[in-house]
Image (spheres, helix red, strand yellow):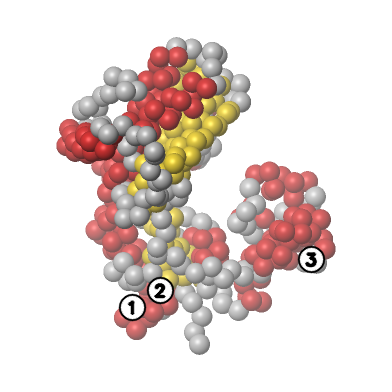
Amino acid sequence: MRSSVILHVDMDAFFAAIEVLDHPGWKGKPLVVGSPPDRRGVVSTCSYEARKFGIHSAMPSRTAGKLCPHAIFVPPRMERYADISHQIMGIFEEFTPLVEPLSLDEAFLDVSGAFHLWGDGVAIAKELKTRIRTRIGLTASVGIASNKFLAKMASDLNKPDGLTVVPVTEPQIKAFLAPLPVGKLWGVGKVSDARLEKAGIRTIGQLQAMDIRALERLFGKAGAQDMADLVRGRDSRPVVTDWEEKSISNEHTFDRDEPDQDRVRQRLLELTEEVGGRLRKAGKFAGTAQIKVRFGDFSTITRQMSFRAAVDSDRVLISTAFSLYDRERISRPIRLIGFGVSKLAGSSSPAPVQAELFTDPKAPQEDARNKKLDHAVDALRKTFGSDAVRRGGPG
């Protein structure tokens, strides 16, 4: 039986590349997508020209501006990026129905069943890259391997516009992984990487040479076996095509710590409406709502509340958001405010609710009116933009 062949396709500097595609005059220049350098915020992504100056995603924009004062800063255009992503995912599906999107700019493809049409994994990857380049004008890097872990690692090794093939047998895989830095391993973040480096462990090969007891001392009993499998390139996860969004959230960072509670509450209202609109667009109902508040010293609080029945109503979401916020009696300036929902249920089966003994007989009619109002507002915003309709308060 032939082993699986998995591709991991990762678009190169996706947001920045789309901006250059739409603005050819920016080609070859350091470009940053994110907040401007004179405002509080972070870098979403940047061009490879900007990366030469040390700029990277999640870096404070002010730091990026100091590293490269002549960089071009542009705000994200998520609708445009989502549109291009949809086109790219459509190209993936020309090769296989087994596509697992991870984000707007990357996905796993199981092409094991497509060889009779397209040839081997390398032939498929080359044709896929060609279609993305000729139809859309962007480049992608592809990793080819027998599992998801190895494919994702491989796609990152020869960026941009790379194509990397991982060997198939375990001895060959171990040899392929051995010289790579431990930071390339899934689950090894900056903290773990620093701890391993302090212990003198810098390459995957050093971890391969350790027995399970030595790995337990580093990663604990729960993580030792997982790490033993990873450093040998073992990963049994299938490509999942029926992935569903688990939560929907939005947050806003103020330019300066905001002392005005009315402004904070207005922003919370707007964030909640945005989440409500996305919830209805996805055909989902939320079982839990949560607020997030961060202060100037970066201390953060989160508070959540579960609904008796899953909801998608702006009126209910806003009332809940304000209830959670007001309970905290916050008086100091706020750096960031956020709102999100989770425990999402499909529109065909929202969570049931037990009937109340004493209810307002007008409640069903009011709920129906609110639902019509929400959908009418959604339609107006879709046609005329997100600022077409604004709510004046929580009611």
As drawn, which residue projects farthest toward the front?
357
Residue at x 48% of width, y 39% of height: 306
Which of the pair 369/390 is nearer the observer?
A: 369
User: Horizontal and vertical percent for residue 86?
Assistant: 29, 54
Point 38% across, 43% down: residue: 355
Q: Closest to the observer: 374 or 364?
A: 364
Q: Please report contact status of discs 2 and 1: CB closer than 8 Å, yes or no.
A: yes
Find out whether the residues at labels 2 and 3 contact each other: C-beta distance under 8 Å: no
Q: Is residue 338 above or below residue 203?
A: above
Residue 336 appears in view: no
- Amino acid at dot 3: Ile
- Kindly report which numbered mark, 1 or 3, lies closer to the viewer in this rendering: 3
* CA distance for labels 2 and 1: 9 Å
SS under mark 3 = helix
Q: Position of residue 6 (x, y in %)?
A: 46, 70
Q: Is 210 placed above or below 137 here? A: below
**In the rendered image, which residue does mark 3 sit on?**
212
Q: Which sits earlier in the primary sequence, circle 1 or circle 3?
A: 1
Mark 2 or mark 1, earlier in chain: 2
Q: Disc number at residue 118?
A: 1
Residue 111: mark: 2
- Between label 2 and label 1, give the one nearer the viewer: 2
The residue shown at (39%, 38%) is: 357
N-terminal-most mark, 2 or 3: 2
**Structural distance between the alpha carbons of marks 1 and 3:** 42 Å
Q: For the residue labelled by badge 1, is the local secondary structure a helix, a strand or a loop? A: helix
Left or right: 173 as drawn, with respect to 392: right
Q: Position of residue 384 (x, y in %)?
A: 17, 33
Question: What separation in Å lies between label 2 and label 3 (alpha carbons)?
Answer: 34 Å
Question: Which quadrant of the figure has residue 15?
Answer: top left
